[in-house]
Amino acid sequence: MFSALTPLDWKRRAVKYYPQKTAIIDGKKQFTYKEFGERINRLSIALNEAGIQEGDHVAVMLPNTHYMLESFYGICQLGAVMVPLNYRISAADMEYIIKHSDAKMLIVDEEFSGPIAEIVDNLSLERIVIVSVPGQDTSLKGVDYESFLEHIPEKAALPEVEIDENQLLTLNYTSGTTSKPKGVMLTHRGNYLNAANFMYHLGVNHDDVYLHTLPMFHANGWGGVWAITAAGATHVCLRKVDPPLILDLFEKQNISLLCGAPTVVNMLVNEPKAKEANIKTRLRMATAGAPPAAALIQKAQDIFGLNMIHVYGLTETSPFILYNEWKKEFDEKTLDEQATIKARQGIELAFNGETKVIHQDGEEVAWNGKELGEIVTRGNVVMDGYYKDPEKTAEAMKDGWFYTGDLAVTYPDGYIEIQDRAKDLIISGGENISSTEVEGVLYKHPDVMETAVIAIPDEKWGEVPKAIIVLHPNRKVTEEDIISFCRSEMAHFKAPKAVEFVEALPKTATGKLQKFRLREMYWKGPKKVN
């Protein structure tokens, strides 16, 4: 009577109970769950006929389209392993990942095929499938996606595959900002339980209309690619983050749920159309990737009535391990106090396992909101390890715990709050300064649109904080103004000692700030990250 835990079973359920429900909206195209299921099955059969069998790896480089959703299910229900690729990384990193992952085939969007064309002669792929895009052209040779499926009958029989819940479902590569990208091995069981967390804690229901603002290649869309199907809700695809288009979709498609990094929230609240948006649904959004500033949360609440749900995790943990549980008692606090609470990462989710903050000796920190330690976790959603990299696996997973590298405190109610990444903590004259704390103060300044705080060398103190700031359009403010503002809001030693104004900050494809790029400008020693 045992049934393996796999998110693929939710596709079966959705097709069975919601065949005529709209499963996907992708621009002018729409598919019911019956149609979605048929396309998935045809893809599986086509892949199998092309030689893909259980345990084989298939790389996929697609934006948030229905083709990407089809690939997740079509590849994985064969017992094969999907390797989602970040289409914004360099050709050299793409080559490394495709080779390292042992991918036999590649499915690629025509718009992003240029880098693949540069490296294709160095790859040993058995076949390339190309998703055609109107107005795009490519020198890459391969079979058209629709042609790949068209000869498969709609009701053709799927190959019989018995899924082991502990086998790999996806192989997700990290960004590789500090070393070569690492392949995170995620299982059927881990994805299932993470998606269950997504459903339960984000309140996913059958009537939800979910906008895929978060790249699906990033930790499998945080589990959204599975959870939305599980509820029989509607997926709305989005090729790229375009604030005016997102606001338009909010109105026209009655979007009720989305996910994204705080930078996406910042883009939306600062979009000129935001204040005129006619949003009829009660919008909620899960945000992670960096601790959102309390001032940003407050602004999103004021403009959209947006219920922001702060979650936390890593690709290595599928990704959710903490969420900010909102209690009724918090409603009685002031709006400023509520926003401050919402900036905390929070407590364990129902299905992930155990998470805590520890000192270097392994003892848990006191729950006083002051003692700093590293977040560690163990349980159902932790990766199987890094693919073909036992040394890195051993560094990250010790004594049955996964070490995140994030420094945090625990409050008396058990809520965890990140103070910094270990590499981002500023140690000035022996005092620890949280770069995220300084950023939180800067976001309160009315002229600051975006900011990143880093350590720069200092002869007297070793290192001091510097603020790199993007101002709102047509705003003028001086370095002295910013420093004085920070000193009025926090201890003087924590305030930036230098300020630089820039047009934009470097970010990853998922919206995370790339502080290592900023640090490289000032450090040639230990602080530099290659």
Image (cartoon, rainbow, N blue to C red):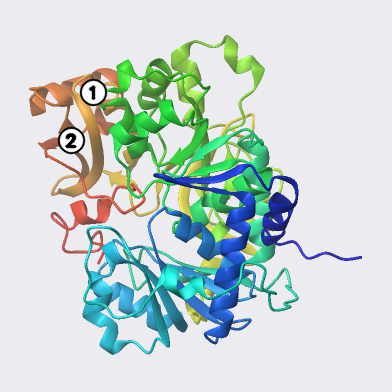
Q: Which residue is mark 1?
A: 272
The residue drawn where x is 58% and y is 38% is 323
Q: Kindly identify which numbered label has been placed on residue 469.
A: 2
Q: Say which of 185 and 60 sits in front.
A: 60
Distance of label 1 from label 2 (alpha carbons): 20 Å
Q: Say which of 96 and 107 sits in front.
A: 107
Task: Tell me the element at label 2.
Answer: strand
Q: In the image, residue 342 lies at what x, y percent?
A: 50, 27
In this rendering, does residue 232 appear at all? yes
Q: In the image, residue 450 lies at what x, y percent?
A: 24, 34
Q: The disc labelled 2 sits on which kind of residue?
A: Ile
Q: In the image, residue 469 lies at what x, y percent?
A: 18, 35
The residue furthest right is 1
Of the image marks 1 and 2, the number of the one nearer the N terminus: 1
Q: Is residue 33 above or below residue 277?
A: below
Between tags 1 and 2, which lies in front? 1
The residue drawn where x is 61% and y is 61% is 38
